[in-house]
Structure formats: C-alpha cells, structure tokens
Image: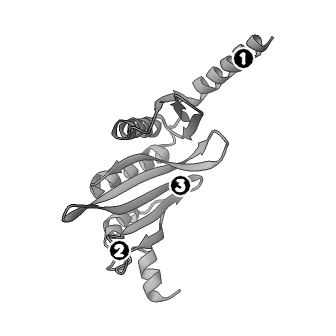
Amino acid sequence: MSDGTKRAREGADPRAPHWFDFNRINDLPNGWAFDILEWDDDPDADGVVDRGEAEVVRDDHRFIITTWLQPRARTHDRYWSIAYETVNQDGEPEPLSFHISTTQAIARNNLGHARDVLDSGDTEPHVLVRDHNDGPRETFEYPAESMAEKAADLQTRLKMDNDDRDYIATVHSKGEWSKQLELERSLDTRTEQ
C-alpha cells in the first residue's frame, strides 16, 4: 500500500477533509477502532461525486458512517448517516441508519452517545418492527432501546418524506416481541384446526 493510499484510509488525505474531525472519536484511549472503507472523489465524473464510508467497531458492535454530497442549485449539502449493524428477521447482519443529517457535529454526537450506551453495559435488546401494509414484516434487533427508538423515528421521518414508503415502525423489547410472536403462532395454529 502506498503512503498516499495509507494516509487516505486513515483520514489524513487532504482530499478527504470530512474524515479529519470525525476520526477524533478515537482521540481518547478506547476500545473502538475507526477505519475508512471507501472513498470516492472522482474529479472527472459528471456532476458532484464525493462519497465516503467508514466503520467504527468494537467486539461484536459495528457502526457504518456514510457521508456524501447532495447537489443543489449552485451549491450542495453534505449528508452524514450513522447506521448500526443490526440482525434482521433472517438472522443476517444488516446496517440500518438511526441518524441522518447535514451536520457533522450532530452525527458525531449521535455516534458518541450510542457508543457510550454500549460501553455502559446497561443495555437490553430491542427490536424495531417495520410492518408493511401490503407485504412483509421486517425486524431489526438493536442492543439498546434508545438506538431502536432513534431508528424508528428516522424510518417514520423517511416515510413522511417519501410517498412510496408504506409501513408502520414500532419498537418492542426483545422479550415482548418473542411473546408476541408466540401468541401469533398459537392463534395461527388454532385457526388452522
């Protein structure tokens, strides 16, 4: 790996200044690792191309941070998305955002708060349920209620901004959700008899 590539991956490349401040999450000694996974800034591309993806990991916990430019008339907005790698209804890892904004400081604060919750060890798994009116029901497991609630709030906001999204997002403790599924299975069995 060349020195230039190594610097870019560490967020020290002058062409990727948006990672400088965000990487400060590792200024203080802690068990979380920050790594840039992808960065695309093609000056020869049509339109604005500036997108990056990084991960913040510790043990089994993984956050995905995505940043991109959204062109507007004569200018652009930089967006930040913070996703936690949840476990979906199929038992597969799937990142689902719990924060999207145009402010880096607020994005860092949301990530910092989520890390602090996980570091405290006082967590109870919660499930975000996205129930589509005309189709499947999806579930996403989070390690803490606050993260699941933030993700549900974001899903509701995205639904309000997009007519093609038709679902209801709710949050339940993992224990409550297990009981709900058992009740539904029991009712289905009685209906079939």
The amino acid type, in three-letter code, at marker 2 is: Asp
Nearer to us of marks 2 and 3 is 2
- Residue 86 placement (x, y as % from top left): 56, 46
Characterize the local packing of mark 3: few (<14), some (14-19) or many (20 or more) Cα atoms within 10 angstroms. Answer: some
- Residue 140 appears in the rendering: yes
Can you say whether 29 is above or below 4 in the image? above
Nearer to us of marks 1 and 3 is 1
Residue bearing the label numbered 3: 62
Which label sits on residue 188? 1
Image quadrant containing the C terminus: top right
Residue bearing the label numbered 2: 46
Image marks 1 and 3: residues in contact by CB distance under 8 Å: no
In primary-sequence order, the first of circles 1 and 3 is 3
Nearer to us of marks 1 and 2 is 2
In primary-sequence order, the first of circles 2 and 3 is 2
Secondary structure at badge 1 equals: helix
Along the horizontal axis of the image, is 170 left or right of 177? Answer: left
| Nearest the eye: 96 or 10 | 96
Image marks 1 and 2: residues in contact by CB distance under 8 Å: no
Residue 178 location, quadrant: top right
**Residue shown at 43% from the left, 63% from the top:** 29
Characterize the local packing of mark 2: few (<14), some (14-19) or many (20 or more) Cα atoms within 10 angstroms. Answer: few
- Residue 67 placement (x, y as % from top left): 37, 61
The amino acid type, in three-letter code, at marker 3 is: Arg
Can you say whether 36 is above or below 92 in the image? below
In primary-sequence order, the first of circles 1 and 2 is 2
Looking at the image, how many numbered discs can be counted on the residues? 3
